[in-house]
Image (cartoon, grey):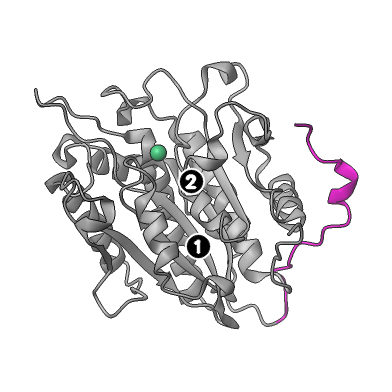
Amino acid sequence: MKKILLTLLGIITLSCNSAQNKASQMTREDYANTITAEELKEQLYVFAGDEMQGRMTGTKGQKLAAEYLRNFYQDHNIPSPIEPNNYYQEIPASYFGSSDKYEASENVVAFIEGTEKPDEIIVLSAHYDHVGMREDGTIYNGADDDGSGTMAMLEMAEAFKMAKENGDGPKRSILFLHVTAEEIGLFGSKYYTDNPLFPLENTVVNLNTDMIGRIDPDKKDNPNYVYLIGSDKLSQELHDVSEAVNEKYVNLELDYTYNDENDPNRFYYRSDHYNFAKNNIPVIFYFNGVHEDYHKPTDTPDKIEYDLLAKRTQLIFQTAWEIANREGRITADKL
Ligand SMILES: [Zn+2]
């Protein structure tokens, strides 16, 4: 797929942060810059460490990973949208099929309420489960898949929380949705869209992140990229805003190779954003492509490109910031 015409960018207006009523001296770039390679690295070494046992749905390792996320939100005073100190959207074992193969599990959720349009929700998502361990004890750490996206979410939550405390909080609300059971069939996101915490008709967009810490071997000579999938499927406006934000603030190469309807990998249908897209909610899926350690025990934290992970996270943060703060709600203008 070809990139969009650059002339389009000229007519997209980004929301301006220099309004007279701005509460603090920090800019959106300052908040984006609180997302650092060092913090992502420090957290990912724990989250994708052996103690988490590969985070297979319903196992002890997955429960430890859920606790890690909950503790992060509690420590940062970022509330749950369910009730105080209950960050878990419980999913019964029966939801995963009748085979008794999987135990009950939980999505982990946190929420930053919008200051002006709190009923309009931006969902940031990443799956925190992975494929577990072999019988011989070999652990699938899942550092890229999807430790990378999960740590990106925590860093973005921290940045939005700081903005809110400074009086620069987002106008629309942001839901941080850490879904479980992706690897066994996108069940966590399906459960969410079947049982949404906020009405789906008020859900503006889903920005989903699944593997953003590595470099596709095809890209090793040009690693300043991220694959975007789905951005123009339901909303041209979303696609144009995403391009304009990147151009102005981040300057990654946005590669649409896998956005092609005829791409045999069909990634558009293969991660959690699809459960939002099928409900006509515009989505963007951020992805680094596959690599030699994909779904292998060698997907470990030492192989992550932390500077690139930080930059990609800043792109998602800036895009979310834009959608949360711009005057009009992004619409599914292609329906
Ligand atoms: Zn994944």
Expressed as whole percent of the image width and height from the top left, the position of residue 279 reads 56, 61
Expressed as whole percent of the image width and height from the top left, the position of residue 42 reads 30, 42
Q: Name the outermost residue toward the left.
A: 136
Determine whether, in the image, residue 157 is placed left or right of residue 80.
right
Disc 2 marks which amino acid?
Answer: Thr
Foreground: 170 or 307?
170
Q: Which residue is mark 2?
A: 209
Foreground: 248 or 67?
67
- Labels 1 and 2: the sequence-earlier one: 1
Q: Is residue 70 above or below residue 167?
A: above
In this view of the protein, can residue 208 be seen by the observer? yes
Determine whether, in the image, residue 154 is placed left or right of residue 83.
right
Q: Residue at x 26, y 44 (%)?
A: 47
Q: Residue at x 50, y 68 (%)?
A: 174
Question: Which quarter of the rendered picture does the N terminus lie within?
Answer: top right
Q: Residue at x 24, y 30 (%)?
A: 140
Expressed as whole percent of the image width and height from the top left, the position of residue 248 reads 73, 49
Q: Residue at x 59, y 79 (%)?
A: 23
Disc 1 marks which amino acid?
Answer: Val
In this view of the protein, can residue 311 be seen by the observer? no
Does residue 149 belong to the magenta stretch?
Answer: no
* Ligand 1 - quadrant of the structure image: top left
Q: Which residue is mark 1?
A: 123
Q: Which residues are magenta?
A: 1-20
Q: Main secondary structure of the magenta part?
A: loop
Q: Is residue 164 above or below residue 222?
A: below
